[in-house]
Image (tube, rainbow, N blue to C red):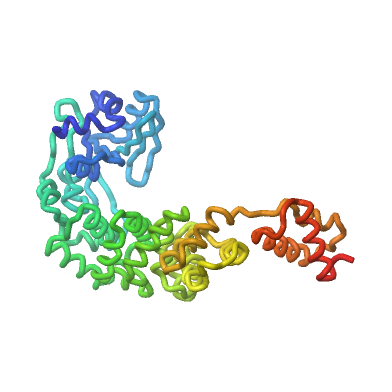
Amino acid sequence: MSLREQIEAVPGMGALLPALEDLPPTYLVGGAVRDLLRGMRPFDLDVAVEGDALDAAETVAQRLDGEVEVHDRFGTATIVAPGLAVDFARTRRETYAAPGALPEVEPAPLEEDLRRRDFTVNAMAAGLSHDRLGELIDPLGGRADLEARVIRVLHDRSFIDDPTRLLRAVRYEVRLDASMDERTEELALEAIDGGALGTVSGKRMRVELMFLLEEEEMPSAVARICGLGIDKHMYPCLRCDPDRAAGTALGAAEVGAERSLAVLATLMVGDADALHPWLDRLAFPRPERERVARAALTGPHLAHTLRADMSDSEVHSLLHGEPVEALAVALGWGAPGEPVLRYVRDLRGATLEITGADLIAAGVAESPAVGEALEETLRRKLDGEVHGRDEELRVALAVARRTGALD
């Protein structure tokens, strides 16, 4: 199948291509071209316009009865229309005021736009305008490198200008079953040893790290970042354990945890003094930050505490309230799978039919004894000793009476 035919077969292109008529020259760029050349369906569509990209995006959105969101910082826009989501950007050049800083951009021809990109395999374009539909523009040899499975930077300051490319290079190595060429790896090591990772914002580093931990061949990526020394410069207390990372990824799928968060937690030393400052630097949203921290601190402990012969109430008592990422970490650290899966499948949502209000209405004084009575009753219910609302209330009142909270 020709590149033109592949483009035409991409979902949404049947609507997008006619909507580009009479606009300035437009091109499919970046990862979408790379993936099409690999015979794969692209998931992210990036369109470069040699002209006013925002005006083009507005026009296309109107023609497709869609919506457009403008991103002022880089003069880009995202169109969402029925069956289609696509990003528009003007072809541009970039300059960096300082290592690790966000780039300053200005309009430039397509070839300059391709030369500003990270690696040759991502520096290709394919024409979308009618007269150039499917034409491959590859001035930097990206197709040859893709076929040779080589990851090659485009200039010597690439990793200095944008240190997140260090993680991206590893991600593309494992995704494409490729390797950095000798010069690219030499530049990567120089940037790592020179402290380049310390010049980029924690948020940008977190985004790239999470992408890497979602890769199918993630254990190989973990081994690679450790082999290059990225781990020690990124976070000195990172554990380099690809096997444990793989086990945690499998555990995340079993318990419904967010894979990247669980794997990150399993690779982190459970030392709050070291862990929390790094999570602060990565600028996680608070809910995610708390889940990662809790999983890193408690997951290994759960792995050492869980036993296959534990009763339902013991399993519930141990795991109740833990984020599912902690359960995935426990599995990655060798916890027996049966009690964890039993908890997720049968025990996590266990509740009583009675509430504290029922006990207070029956004469139990408002006190910690109410919670204690409910906990003891739930334990007995989980172990099959209590059945039905009436029996729950009878047992709970007996427990409260024993503690002196009910006459």
Which residue appears at 35% of the width and 62% of the height?
A: 246
Along the viewing direction, whichever of 162 and 243 lies nearer the viewer: 243
- Relative placement, left or right, of 311 versus 336 is right
Along the viewing direction, whichever of 22 and 258 lies nearer the viewer: 258
Q: Can you say which quadrant of the picture contains the C terminus? A: bottom right
Indicate the quadrant where residue 7 lies.
Answer: top left
Position above or below: 344 against 46: below
- Relative placement, left or right, of 92 versus 141 is right
Q: Can you say which quadrant of the picture contains the N terminus? A: top left
- The x, y position of residue 242, in whole percent, is 32, 66
Q: Residue furthest right?
A: 407
- The x, y position of residue 141, in whole percent, is 10, 48
Along the viewing direction, whichever of 344 and 270 lies nearer the viewer: 344
Which residue appears at 12% of the width and 51% of the height?
A: 145
Please indicate, yes or no, whether residue 276 appears anywhere in the rendered image: no
- The x, y position of residue 191, in whole percent, is 23, 68
- Relative placement, left or right, of 35 versus 255 is left
Q: How many marks?
A: 0
Which residue appears at 24% of the width and 51% of the height?
A: 94
Please indicate, yes or no, whether residue 391 appears anywhere in the rendered image: yes
Position above or below: 390 against 232: above
Indicate the quadrant where residue 355 lies.
Answer: bottom right
- The x, y position of residue 337, in whole percent, is 46, 62
